[in-house]
Amino acid sequence: MISVSNIKKEFGGIPLFQEVTFNINPRDRIGLAGVNGAGKSTLLKIISGELEADTGKIVFPSDVSIGYLPQEKKISSGLTIFNEAMQVFNFLDEYKIEIENIHKRFENNTDLTDAKYSDLVERLEFLEARLSLFSPEQLKGNAEKYLKGLGFKREDLVRPMTEFSMGWQMRVEIAKLLLVKPSLLLLDEPTNHLDIESIQWVEEFLKSYPGSVMVVSHDRSLLDNITNRTIEISNSKVYDYKAAYSEYIQLREERESHLKATYNNQQREINEVERFIERFRYKASKAKQVQSRVKQLERMEVVELDNIDKSAIHFMFPPAPHSGKVTVDGKTVSKSYDKNLVLNNIDFEILKGEKIAFIGRNGEGKSTLAKIIAGTIDYTGDLKLGHQVVTGYFAQDQGDMLDPELTVFETVDNVAIGEIRKRINSLLGAFLFQGDDINKKVKVLSGGEKSRLSLVLLLLNPTNLLIMDEPTNHLDLRSKDILKNALLQYDGTLIIVSHDRDFLQGLTERLYEFRDNRIKEYRGDIEHYLEKRKIETLSDLETEKVDSDKRRSEVSENKLKWESKKVLDKKVRKLNNNISRIESQINNYESKLELLNNKLSRPDEFEEEIKSGELYKEHDEISNIISEAYDLWNAEQEKLEDLTRQE
């Protein structure tokens, strides 16, 4: 168990959080919740040892190891994908060197004290035990399996890290963490770098992970699927809920409602007591009652309402201008980066008012096609935008395109035209830029603040084709819900690239899956797509060519095995029922024997029955019955064990 006790952290004299206390138990699955800026990432850094707390302490058992995945990490490796993943096992070589050095000390030193000798022996046992856990072949097999689960193809494993984007390099960091299996995994927005299929793989891995997991994520589905506990940071305090995210939201609302009702009742009681004191303060006949009321107030533990932070962006997209029936028409569209073919002769059509999702593994061309439609990169083939189509584009790295030297206000003011310039302050306020925030320079903004500012720019001009590439990566869950609601009510055409299943659910009516340089259309939303893909995978397995004679032989053999197992299962069930019945009888007779022993221990109360010998006679009879029952129980257990070995 890891103990976090009274942790406090301040920045610029302002507490980010204080009096943070909780325990992390073995196999805990904790979701860390809170709005952007609440201190979730900071708390992970403190637990991992990357950052020091101002006060408080964290106590770890000596055998606990910690693995930490930050949101972003500077990676500069010239190794291949596979070799970089295997770097995580370099400590094994260090262990071997240390073992050799300990053996040399034993051979060459005769002046070792008993204490030093004992410490070295203990250290040697630890190192050799750790080494025995790692088989070279198993390590290589796991590395390949984990990397493939995270989306790498077999041929990718021998390519250098430098050929991959930062997102793909972060996947290698995830694989390295999972390979060493630390006692506690600290994951800060791990799904930012993953596509839907890789997220599903990570989910299944974490469900059966033998250690503890604490995760910060804006992916509601991930939190619901893997966590069983939610720790919320709100207004410098922490609240611990034994529930996954969606249930935590409900429990939090119930707690707030109950607390508010208790607060209101207490305030009414306080007001009544204060009115009584004020009314009769100077009446001698009421002096005793007044003093009683004063003491009542002094003893009262005053209920305080939590200052719940409900800040979230709030906006609607402007009405879409009129456009033609066909919004985008693409024929034989292709795109290559040097020799790397990304899109190969794809055809597609998007009609006015449709909401379309681009999904698939990273690197398959989703963002590339979004950029082609937005007109930011070249391509080959034929692509036409419809009559009077006006495009708005939110790029995945939109925040990085802002001028870092401009202030928040200047960024918007430089783009705004006409009447909307009079409403810049209120527009920025809707996106949580208030007071002095509007004078901050872009270069000091967080990732979430840059994303919000980019959304503000998107609202300055009405559009009828909105292209959004991963707009939710830096938004907290409440802001994501508001963005989703705004997109649902948007009356133009929407193209959205996202790996966030919860965000996509119910938002789009058609999907294009990107795979192997092509695209495939699916009707329905993300849930329908996931169900369909699972069915297709099973169908693919069923259509593999198998020799028909061999298949018939296997069917016959399986049938015999099934019939034999059916008979065996029936015998096992019968024995289990017999054993349960005998155990029940033993329990009943042992209860009766206990009552008899109780009577025999109180001769004053049961003198006649004891003298007559009735109690002793009954005691012997029941003891014999119990002994016979145990013999029968043992015989049935032996039969059951014999049958179990046959399974």
Image (tube, rainbow, N blue to C red):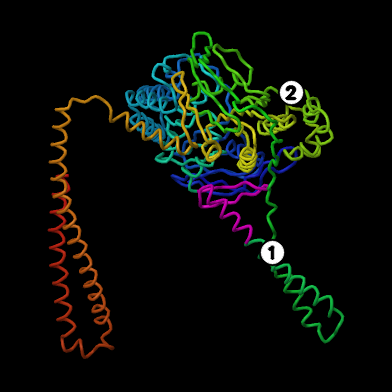
Residues in magenta? 229-257
Q: Which element is circle 2 on?
A: loop
Whether tag 2 and tag 1 are in contact, CB under 8 A, the answer is: no
The residue located at (44%, 19%) in the rendering is 516
Residue 109 appears anywhere in the view: no
> Can residue 606 be seen in this snapshot?
yes
The residue lying toward the viewer, choosing from 395 and 571, is: 395
In which quadrant is the C terminus drawn? Answer: top left
Q: Is 474 within the magenta?
A: no
Q: Position of residue 293 (x, y in %)?
A: 75, 76
- Label 2 packing within 10 angstroms: few (<14), some (14-19), many (20+): some
Rendered image quadrant of residue 548: top left
Name the foreground residue: 490 vs 88: 490
* Looking at the image, residue 429 lies above or below residue 237: above
Magenta span contains residue 243: yes
Please, which residue is most extreme toward the top here? 339
The amino acid on which the numbered mark 2 sits, given as a three-letter code, is Pro
Q: Pointer 1: what residue?
A: 263
Q: Which residue corresponds to mark 2?
A: 404
Mark pair 2, 1: CA separation: 46 Å
Q: Residue at x 50, y 31 (%)?
A: 511
